[in-house]
Image (cartoon, grey):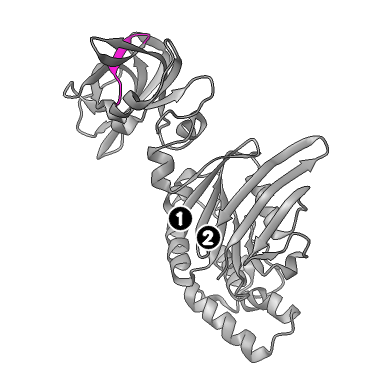
């Protein structure tokens, strides 16, 4: 097994910088997910690691060895692509063993490695088939098997599930998680799908415009987003955001905005704020409760009600703040209908508070 380090990586295409001063330390055996919207630099970063793109500046280390200027074949990595990249004229066994045959491995060793990988992936019965005879999920297993037989130090996955239907994606996510646990290899996985990131990752790297916005476990990026971008990017439905200022009333810290005045979270008392400082408040739809049992309250004028069995997703506008879209997740048996006014409340400590000018979280 091996760790991976990226030091001050920069990538420019002409005058356009697509990766900016990227530093990243991926621990040995870790499943690291690079997450972001299309064009954010995550796939370019993966291709730089693989050696398919040359970094304009910076260094890449695998197992403490500088591989920056090495050919992809010499980096001891294996990559699984979005489009599978299988040879249509070869059967599964030959597709899986192609790199071993090119490297001149003995035939008996090739046979053993292919059989072992096929058993792990449950495709032993497919070894004599051609790619055209396989389903999408089977082709993806073959592509993964081709990577496994190489026994690389680092696995690289470039959106490997994006071509599969929703049900099969869910199944393959579970299989990938089990596979990583079994092999224990350092893995870098690129996706724009936050569900994949949250369910697979040891840690997530969130990209925006070629820069890392936050690195953390799924729990950390969901519960303690570093900035407004991460807060709005992670979570379905997205976090509700409101502008506010901080005021003191009768010795209590209050957050005041259009149509609301809420108690501040306890931790904000330890933060130095300027009078009238512009803030952005965030409240996750999952933190809202029907009724008025909690300290901070609001009313939602519903425009959309999505009944999902155990829960319902409500969307509409907050009374007193009609220009702002607002979402809530409530129990499935909650009585909510289109156009109704639903009272909601939440605990002050469920609030996220950001500096509106810098976008950074104020939480210590």
What residue span does the magenta drawing correspond to?
257-265
Secondary structure category for the residue under label 1: loop
Labels 2 and 1 touching (C-beta < 8 A): yes
273 vs 299, left or right, is: right
- Where is residue 127, by image quadrant? bottom right
Query: What residue is shown with label 2?
Result: 27
- Where is residue 48, by image quadrant? bottom right
Query: What residue is shown with label 1?
Result: 202
263 vs 12, left or right, is: left
Secondary structure category for the residue under label 2: loop
Q: Is residue 185 magenta?
A: no
Q: Residue furthest right?
A: 14
Residue 257 lies, with reference to residue 14, above or below; the image says above
- Quarter holding the N terminus is bottom right
Foreground label between 2 and 1:
2
Residue 122 visible, this angle: no
- Where is residue 243, by image quadrant? top left
Expressed as whole percent of the image width and height from the top left, the position of residue 108 reads 63, 91
């Amino acid at each position: 097994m091996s760790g991976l380090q990226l030091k001050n990586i920069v990538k420019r295409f002409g005058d356009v910088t697509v990766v900016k001063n990227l530093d990243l330390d991926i621990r040995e055996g870790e499943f690291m997910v690079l997450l972001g919207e299309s064009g954010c630099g995550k796939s370019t970063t993966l291709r730089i690691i693989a050696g398919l793109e040359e970094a304009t500046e910076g260094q890449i280390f695998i197992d403490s060895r500088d591989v920056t200027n090495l050919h992809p074949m010499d980096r001891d990595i294996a990559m699984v692509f979005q489009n599978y990249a299988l040879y249509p004229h070869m059967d599964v066994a030959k597709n899986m063993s192609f790199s071993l045959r090119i490297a001149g491995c003995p035939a008996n060793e090739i046979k053993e490695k292919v059989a072992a990988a096929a058993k792990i992936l449950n495709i032993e019965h497919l070894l004599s088939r051609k790619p055209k005879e396989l389903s999408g999920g089977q082709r993806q297993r073959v592509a993964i098997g081709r990577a496994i037989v190489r026994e690389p130090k680092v696995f690289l996955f470039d959106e490997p599930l994006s071509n599969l239907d929703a049900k099969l994606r869910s199944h393959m996510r579970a299989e990938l998680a089990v596979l990583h646990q079994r092999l224990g290899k350092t893995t870098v996985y690129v996706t724009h799908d936050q569900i994949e990131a949250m369910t697979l990752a040891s840690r997530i790297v969130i990209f925006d415009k070629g820069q890392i916005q936050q690195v953390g476990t799924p729990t950390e990026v969901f519960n303690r987003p570093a900035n407004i971008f991460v807060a709005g990017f992670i979570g379905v439905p997205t976090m509700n955001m409101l502008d506010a200022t901080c005021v003191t009333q009768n010795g209590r810290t209050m957050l005041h905005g259009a149509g609301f005045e809420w108690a501040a979270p306890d931790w904000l008392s330890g933060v130095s704020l300027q009078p009238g400082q512009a803030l952005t408040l965030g409240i996750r739809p999952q933190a809202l409760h029907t009724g008025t049992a909690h300290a901070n309250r609001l009313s939602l004028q519903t425009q959309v009600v999505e009944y999902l069995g155990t829960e319902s997703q409500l969307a509409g506008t907050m009374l007193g703040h009609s220009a702002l879209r607002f979402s809530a997740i409530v129990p499935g048996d909650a009585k909510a209908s289109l156009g109704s006014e639903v009272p909601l409340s939440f605990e002050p400590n469920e609030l996220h508070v950001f500096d509106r000018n810098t976008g950074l979280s104020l939480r210590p």
